[in-house]
Image (cartoon, helix red, strand yellow):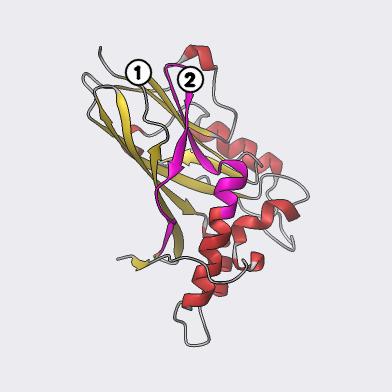
Amino acid sequence: MGRSVGAGPARCAALVAAAALYWPTLALAHPHGSIECKAQVQLEAGRLQSLRGELLLDAWHSQQAIALLRDASGQVDPQRLLRFVFALKMQIGRINWLFDLKADGENVNIQPKADPTVEIVNERIRINIDYAPDPAATPAQRFSLNCNDPTYYYVTAFGKTIVVAPPEGAARNDVDPAQLAAKLAQIGTVDPNPSAVTVKGCAQLRMGVLDEKLGAPRVGMARMDWVCAP
């Protein structure tokens, strides 16, 4: 069972060190870790109503973040959590991290409806973000949802964890490029797990990577397309 940790407004400046997610600015070579993505999408008459994104950090980065969030007694410190959430908000706003959506080839402006929430699930960090379109979305039939880290610090996949281990003797979680390439080749770069993205309110739903106009997803970056009947 996951332990839910609520997120409230930050009362002080972000302690950047409390958010392992800010390490992209310190990285010398990318990528360094992985994130498993999931999403729940609600449509109505071809219009996006809401999108709930879920991000599961890899074990190594989760351990670092959890160690910073917990106090000496092993409990999550509320003030540390506030700073962590504030840092998350800055990351999401600064580089559109990690979800973006296209409808009939046009960008849909999705904005978080509230602060992210953070859960510790089996010693892994899980981040939940609820989005809504702003302004209201127009009707569409073809949709494309990306879960990508623009800094390429993390590789992403829908419903799959890409295990990337540091080279032997590495001081931090540096990823061996050869190992990463082998892992990506093993799982396939265009092989999303449809069960990781739930779409409701869509007639005659077809899912996969379907939109040829957008080309193939970049290696290590997740994309899921779907089509609704007119």
Crowd band around label 1 with a 10 angstrom C-alpha radius: few (<14), some (14–19), many (20+): many
Examine the structure image and report whether residue 101 is included in the region drawn in magenta: yes
The residue under the point 42% across, 65% down is 7
Q: Nearer the viewer, residue 157 or 8?
A: 8
Q: What segment is highlighted magenta in the picture? A: 90-119
Picture disc at residue 161: none
Residue lying farthest front? 135
Q: Is residue 11 magenta?
A: no
Q: Amino acid at mark 1?
A: Ala
Disc number for residue 140: 1
* Residue drawn 75% across the image and 46% down it: 29
Q: Farthest right residue?
A: 28
Give left or right: position of 181 versus 114.
right
Position of 65 relative to 192 (above/below): below
The answer to which quarter of the image holds residue 83 is bottom right
Task: Tell me if label 1 and label 2 are in contact, CB under 8 Å.
Answer: yes
Measured as percent of width and height from the top left, residue 52 is found at 36, 44
